[in-house]
Every structure is written in structure tokens, then in C-alpha cells.
Image (cartoon, helix red, strand yellow):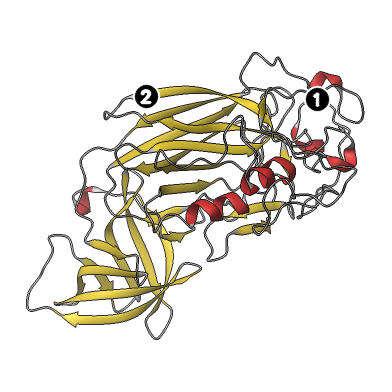
Amino acid sequence: MLKKVLFSVLLGANALTPALAWNTKPTGTYSVTVTNQTYGHGFSFPVAATHSSALHVFQVGQLASVQAANVAQTGSPVSTFNFLAGKLSSGEVTDVYGHPFPMAARGASTAPWPAGLPFFDALSSTPGLKPTTTGQTLLSSINFTLGANPSDRLSLIMMMMCTNDGLAGLDSVALPEQYGETKIYNFYAYDAGVEQNTELSADIVDPCGLMAPRAANGDPQVSTTDGNRNSPPTASQTPPTTNTDASIQTSNPIALFSSPTIGGKADIPANFAWNTNLPVGVVTITRIDGPRVDANLTHDSTNQNIHLADVQVLDRHYKVQLKTQGDKLYSLVSADELTKQAHSKPAQYDTNTALLTIPSVEIGARQYRAVLKNLGNFVFRLERLEEPDTAFGL
């Protein structure tokens, strides 16, 4: 399932939602739940993907990639998300998900994320960290869906927020094969080997001070940028030259190794250490795809066009193409009149309200009704998604 046309839907006046997509029918759809099992460490914005078995976001025993080093040092998901999204067209990656907020530590499920702090906007044409407009509650457990093809694997990566360069996640694990089947994986913490473990507040990303249920001596404020005085890697750099601050950089970058912990030697309390024999989190993956409904909608990934086989306007029917403009906007490319109704559940355009209603849009493993409004000159904005009902035979 190639998530190519992304859009955001506000479920409430100030709520922010994860990425959604107009989808073609996937080979398989999976519900993924990630749970933080630590009592002292928040996780940075998790990034997950389904991909070919040849692809690795990180590997224990190997030098950290630029993407893994970025996550481990700064907590930023942008480099990793863009790396994975860039491989959608080649088929190396089938689906990618970036969570909009960090995850709280266990026992801190009401951790605050004040207005103005960054959220990860994976929906724009240039995914990045942007300030929130309202405060959020961080959760210690999150859920999302991913599509996958046969033999695909799943990877997950995020930063251990109260460390210098600790990361956590899964490297290329197998997915359930049968509908309803579940696989459960523990995941562990790793040291990326690209920064000295000073445990100094100046070298720890700012959100550490907000996200833990125990007192943390990290910087109390949170910037929308790094918060770590160490320069993060860039896309043009590869380890071992990922850092510019010699006092922070690991002098000879080393391979990722398992189970870093906290020594309590500086500004991070010793009680933030964890049992190195135990996982820091758990991932539950369930295959949830079932029977499909013909959605009267296809997506041309080359031209970024949406094709509607049948749109009814009064007593006439049209074959319609819409062009993706970004920010939930779509412009009319063409509308060719049909000689007769071409689909059992045509989309409906109401000339009085200027609303285009598409009765069946597939998102993950579920069907929704999408409502778009003509803003003028046949530029449409996605207004809302609605749960399907019997009026549409769903």
C-alpha cells in the first residue's frame, strides 16, 4: 500500500491527527501498537515502515546510518521519514508512518506537551517539525496502521530522550501472515556510538525535562530545534564525520551496541537507569485486513491524480480527475460526461452546497465517506471524513 496522497483531518477544534491516505487496495493491512515500558524515558517521534528484507534503518553491530544518528542525537524523525518515503516509488518501502508527537514514559501518560512545542507534520509536501497550536497529552502507548506486501518486514526507530545518543526500536522483523494473526516483539535500547555519554543537560535534548515521571535535570524549556549543542548529521554526511563538536563527538565512532544505560554521573539522575537485560518497550502487530469495498477511486502515483470513475451531478454522470495540491486541496483536471451511470455507488456533487461526497474511501483497513468543498473554480478542500452508514451500503 503506497501512501502517496496524504491529508490531515481535524477531529476536534484543536486536535491533531496522524497521517491518513487515499489508498489503493493493499496486500495486507496491519494494526501496530507501540508501548513504552520504561519509567524514566520518553521516546522521540516514532517512525515505522514496512519494507523489503534487504533494507535496514539500523543494525546492531554496524555503524549508525546518518538517519539513525539523527534520531539518536536529536530525536528528530525528519531525516529517517524522508529517507523511507523516498523509497516508496522504488518499491523498497511499501508504507511509512511518522507519529506526530513523542511518547511519554510509563507512569507519565499525562505528560504535557505545551502549545508552541514541535509536532511532526508528515502530511505536507515537505515533512518537518512545526509548532503545535495547542497543548497535547503525550501517551505511553500509541496505535497506527501500515500496509505491507508479501515478504515485507517492519522496522521502528525512536530516540531514548534522556540519553546522549540512545535509540530504541526494531530492525526488520517479520509480519503476521494470516488475517487475525498477531506477533508481539520486545524491543531494546542501543547506543548509536556517535556521541560521548556525558549525561550533561547541555548535551541532552530539552524534552527530557518534560517527559519523565521522575525529576529530570534536563533543560526545562523546549525549543523547536535540536536543544543539543552537538551539531546533528546532515544528509550529505556519513559516519564517522557526523559531528563537529570534538568535546561531544565520540572520537572514533563505534558500532551500535546494545543496552546503554545511565550512570548518574552528571545531570541525569541515576534512577533513570534501566535493567539492561530487559526490553524498554513492546510492539504488537495484528493483521487486520478483510473483505474490501470497491471505492470508486484510484490514485495515479506518477501524476498525483485522483480518478473517480463516476460522479453524479443532478441527473448526469461524469468521470473525474482531481490533482493533488497539498494542504488538503485538490483541483479539477477533467470531467468527462458518461453516457450512463458507471458505478454502483457514484460520488455525488451537490450544486447547491458545492459539496463533493465520495461514499467509499479506504484508510488502513476501514472505509470512510469523504466530503470535499468546492472553494471556487473547482478547487476542492477536504472538509471531513465520516463513518460509513447503511445509506451507502457499507
Crowding near pointer 2: few (<14 within 10 Å), some, many (20+)?
A: some
Q: Secondary structure at mark 2?
A: strand
Please state which amino acid type lies under the numbered disc 2.
Answer: Thr
Q: Quadrant of residue 376?
A: bottom left
Q: Is residue 166 above or below residue 244?
A: above
- Does residue 186 show up? yes
Crowding near pointer 1: few (<14 within 10 Å), some, many (20+)?
A: some
Q: Outermost residue, front direction?
A: 252
Q: Is residue 9 left or right of residue 61?
A: left
Q: Outermost residue, left direction?
A: 340
Q: Quadrant of residue 105?
A: top right
Q: Depth-wise, is mark 2 or mark 1 nearer the camera?
A: 2
* Residue on which disc 2 sits: 182
The mark tally for this picture is 2
Q: Secondary structure at mark 1?
A: loop
Q: Nearer the viewer, residue 354 or 16?
A: 16
Residue at (38, 56) in percent of width and height: 90
Q: Is residue 106 above or below residue 240?
A: above
Residue 79 point in image, percent of width and height: 61, 53
Q: Is residue 49 left or right of residue 342?
A: right
Residue at (67, 51) in percent of width and height: 238
Q: Which mark is residue 106?
A: none
Residue 187 point in image, percent of width and height: 56, 25
Q: Nearer the viewer, residue 338 or 348?
A: 338
Q: Is residue 40 above or below residue 58?
A: above
The alpha-carbon separation of the residues under discs 2 and 1 comes to: 33 Å
Q: Is residue 79 left or right of residue 320?
A: right
Q: Nearer the viewer, residue 237 or 189?
A: 237
Residue 31 point in image, percent of width and height: 40, 35
* Residue on which disc 1 sits: 214
